[in-house]
Image (cartoon, grey):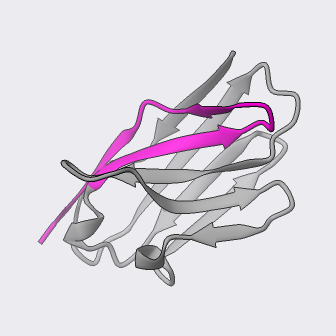
Amino acid sequence: QVRLVESGGGLVQAGGSLRLSCAASGSIVKVKAMGWYRQAPGKRRDLVATVTTGGRTNYGDSVKGRFTISRDNAENTVYLQMNSLKPEDTAVYYCYVDVFLDDYWGQGTQVTVSS
């Protein structure tokens, strides 16, 4: 079993910054990728950013240039630096890990951006 522990969410004013962290632990043999998705009320879960073990990143269009994903492979930890936050970034942010044969999701952390 794999466990994901997320931290760093909260309330911030528009234009501010937050940093999310997610640590994966448990029966992890090899990680293909880690990343973040988000889901606002009444909307589908959308890609925020992903990063592979090799360092390849992929970002959702709405966060390009504002968010940066990074990863500590040795610690199976992924970070999301979020700058220039907008009210439309308000959502529950979910961490995930792809371990080739399966993927696992965290419980989610709330990010609220006030205008």
Spot occupied by residue 93 in the image (x, y as percentages of width and height) = 40, 48
Which residue is more in the foreground, 88 or 45? Answer: 45
Which residue is more in the foreground, 3 or 74? Answer: 3
- Residue at x 50%, y 84% (from the top left corner): 65
Tell me: residue 19, above or below residue 22: below
Tell me: residue 50, above or below residue 58: above
108 relative to 86 in the view: left or right = right
38 relative to 106 in the view: left or right = left
Q: Tell me the quarter of the image containing the N terminus.
A: top right
Q: Residue furthest top?
A: 1
- Residue at x 25%, y 59% (from the top left corner): 90
| Magenta-colored span | 91-115
Spot occupied by residue 40 in the image (x, y as percentages of width and height) = 26, 52
Q: Residue furthest bottom?
A: 65
Q: Quadrant of residue 58?
A: bottom right
Residue 104 within the magenta-colored segment of the rendering? yes
Q: Residue furthest left?
A: 115
Q: Main secondary structure of the magenta part?
A: strand
Spot occupied by residue 115 in the image (x, y as percentages of width and height) = 11, 72
Spot occupied by residue 51 in the image (x, y as percentages of width and height) = 70, 60
98 relative to 31 in the view: left or right = left
- Residue at x 50%, y 80% (from the top left corner): 64
Report how many numbered discs are placed on residues in the image: 0
- Residue at x 77%, y 39% (from the top left corner): 75
Q: Quadrant of residue 68?
A: bottom right
Residue 10 within the magenta-colored segment of the rendering? no
